[in-house]
Image: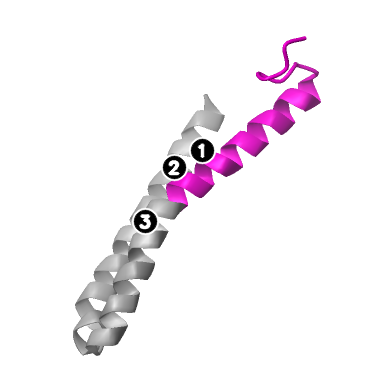
Amino acid sequence: MSRLLVAIVGALVVVAFYVVLLYGFATWIWPVLPDWAILIAFVLIAVALVGSPIMALRFYGQVRSATRKARGQPEEDDPS
């Protein structure tokens, strides 16, 4: 149960960090950027918001398979 609580708190911290970062960026930095920089920033924000869950799932898969190997359990793809 404590591992679940740590995971939930960690996820909430990451989400809160994203919200604060995006709010600060939109409030103070975005209005003073030139048009070309706004376009680049928009693309980078989109890549970060789409890519971070994908990378998190990729990392989770590696951790999960390493945990299974450490426990001596067969891989899901392994038919033996």
What amino acid type is highlighted by mark number 3? Leu
Q: Which residues are magenta?
A: 52-80
Which numbered tag is attached to residue 9? 2
- Is the C-beta separation of discs 2 and 1 under 8 Å? yes
Q: Residue furthest top?
A: 80
User: Main structural element of the magenta stretch: helix, strand or loop?
Assistant: helix
- In the shown orientation, is residue 55 left or right of residue 8? right
Crowd rating for badge 1 (residues with CA inside 10 Å; few <14, some 14–19, many 20+): few
Of badges 1 and 3, the one in the foreground is: 3
What amino acid type is highlighted by mark number 2? Val
Residue 17 in sight from this viewpoint: no
What amino acid type is highlighted by mark number 1? Val
Badge 3 marks a residue whose secondary structure is: helix
- Asked where in the image residue 59 lies, by quadrant, the reply is top right
Which residue is rendered at x = 24% and y = 80% of the image?
30
Which numbered tag is attached to residue 49? 3
